C-alpha cells in the first residue's frame, strides 16, 4: 500500500485557523485528473495543490472540490511553504512552478513568502444584468477580469454586510471580486471574493484576485506597493507589489495538519 505526504496549510496568515486553508499533496508520479479531483473533493478545501518534482522545478496543479482551476495564489503559497518547511528546498532557494498559467516563482524572506504571478488587469465592461440584485448592493464601478468580474462598492459597510444570492450569481459569472477603498490607514483596499461557479461560495483569501486588485487599485491610488485585506470570516492580509506585467504577492503561512494519503 503506497502513501503520499499530504498537508493542510493556512495561507496569508501567521496564525493557525486564520487566512485561507489549502491542501498540498506531494506526488511521486503523475496521477490522473480524476484521482486528483477525487482527492480535492475528499479534502473539501477551496483548493488542493498537487506537486510533481521536475528537473528544474515542480509541476503544479490546483483543484477545487468541483473543478481544476488555472491559477490559485493561496495554494501556491502553501506549496512553497511546505517545500521550505520540509527541507525539500533550502531557504535561499527560489521555488519554481510550472502551471497552466505559465511559470510561477516564490522566494522566502524571513517568515514572509513572496509569489511572482502574472498580472490580470481588469478591463472596462458594462455591468451584467442582474449583478446588483445578486450581490444585494449597487456597485459604483464594474470591470471584467480573468476570474469573472470586479465590482467596486462605495463603502466598507456595504462590503461587510454583503450576503449574495449565490444561485443567482452563478448564472451571471463564475466569480466576482467585490472591493472598496480602505477607510483606515491600516490597509489600502478591502475585498471579498465569491466564486460559486467554481464550487466556492466565498473564498477566505484569494491570491489570484489580488493579481487583478493590485493593478486596479494601483492605478486608482497611484501606488506600486499596497496592502490588501480580504474581509472574509477568517480574514487575511496580502501585500502586493506591481512589477510590470507581473504582480508580487506577499504573505505568511502556517502548517496545521500533516498526514499520509493512501494512494
Image (spheres, helix red, strand yellow):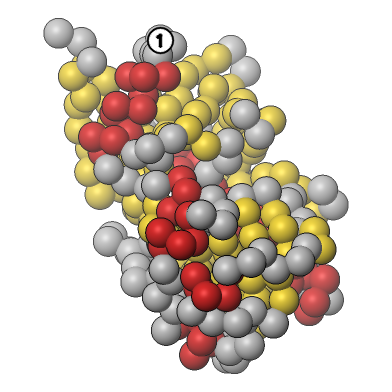
Which is more toward the observer, 179 or 238?
179
Q: Residue furthest left?
A: 1
Q: Residue furthest front?
A: 129
Residue 132 in the figure: left or right of residue 259: right
- For the residue pair 82 and 151, the one nearer the viewer reads as 151
* Number of residue marks: 1
Quadrant position of the N terminus in the picture:
top left
Which of the pair 48/3 is nearer the observer?
A: 48
Q: Which residue is mark 1?
A: 29
Q: Is any atom of residue 209 visible in this view?
A: yes
Is 257 positioned to the left or the right of 61 in the image? left
Q: Give the quadrant of residue 242.
A: bottom right
Q: Quadrant of the C terminus?
A: top left
- The residue positioned 42% from the left and 27% from the top of the image is 50
Residue 224 x/y as whole percent: 79, 67
Q: Residue at x 36, y 24 (%)?
A: 36
| Residue 216 rendering spot, x and y as whole percentages | 75, 67
Q: Residues within 10 Å of mark 1 (few under 14, many from 20)?
A: few
- Helix, strand or loop at disc 1? loop
Residue 48 to residue 145: above or below: above
Location of residue 236 with respect to 5 vertically, above or below: below
Viewed as shown, does residue 32 lie left or right of 124? left
Q: Is residue 112 visible?
A: no
Residue 109 x %, y %: 57, 52
Q: Position of residue 241 (x, y in %)?
A: 71, 61
Q: Residue at x 64, y 71 (%)?
A: 151
Q: Residue at x 32, y 34 (%)?
A: 40
Amino acid at each position: 500500500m503506497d502513501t503520499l505526504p499530504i498537508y493542510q496549510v493556512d495561507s496569508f496568515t501567521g496564525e493557525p485557523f486564520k487566512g485561507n486553508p489549502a491542501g498540498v499533496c506531494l506526488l511521486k508520479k503523475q496521477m490522473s485528473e480524476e484521482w486528483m479531483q477525487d482527492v480535492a473533493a475528499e479534502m473539501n478545501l477551496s483548493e488542493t495543490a498537487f506537486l510533481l518534482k521536475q528537473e528544474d522545478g515542480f509541476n503544479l496543479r490546483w483543484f477545487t472540490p468541483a473543478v481544476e482551476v488555472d491559477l490559485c495564489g493561496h495554494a501556491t503559497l502553501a506549496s512553497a511553504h511546505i517545500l521550505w518547511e520540509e527541507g525539500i528546498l533550502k531557504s535561499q532557494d527560489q521555488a519554481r512552478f510550472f502551471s497552466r498559467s505559465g511559470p510561477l516563482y516564490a522566494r522566502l524572506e524571513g517568515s514572509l513568502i513572496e509569489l511572482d504571478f502574472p498580472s490580470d488587469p481588469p478591463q472596462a465592461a458594462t455591468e451584467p444584468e442582474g449583478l446588483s440584485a445578486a450581490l444585494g448592493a449597487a456597485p459604483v464601478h464594474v470591470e471584467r477580469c480573468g476570474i469573472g468580474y470586479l465590482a467596486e462598492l462605495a463603502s466598507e459597510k456595504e462590503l461587510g454586510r454583503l450576503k449574495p444570492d449565490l444561485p443567482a450569481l452563478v448564472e451571471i459569472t463564475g466569480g466576482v471580486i467585490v472591493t472598496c477603498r480602505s477607510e483606515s490607514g491600516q490597509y489600502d483596499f478591502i475585498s471579498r471574493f465569491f466564486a460559486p461557479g467554481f464550487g466556492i461560495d466565498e473564498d477566505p483569501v484569494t491570491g489570484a484576485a489580488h493579481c487583478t486588485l493590485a493593478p486596479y487599485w494601483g492605478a486608482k491610488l497611484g501606488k506600486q506597493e499596497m496592502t490588501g485585506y480580504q474581509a472574509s470570516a477568517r480574514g487575511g492580509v496580502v501585500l502586493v507589489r506591481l512589477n510590470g506585467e507581473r504582480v508580487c504577492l506577499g504573505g505568511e503561512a502556517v502548517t496545521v495538519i500533516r498526514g499520509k494519503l493512501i494512494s
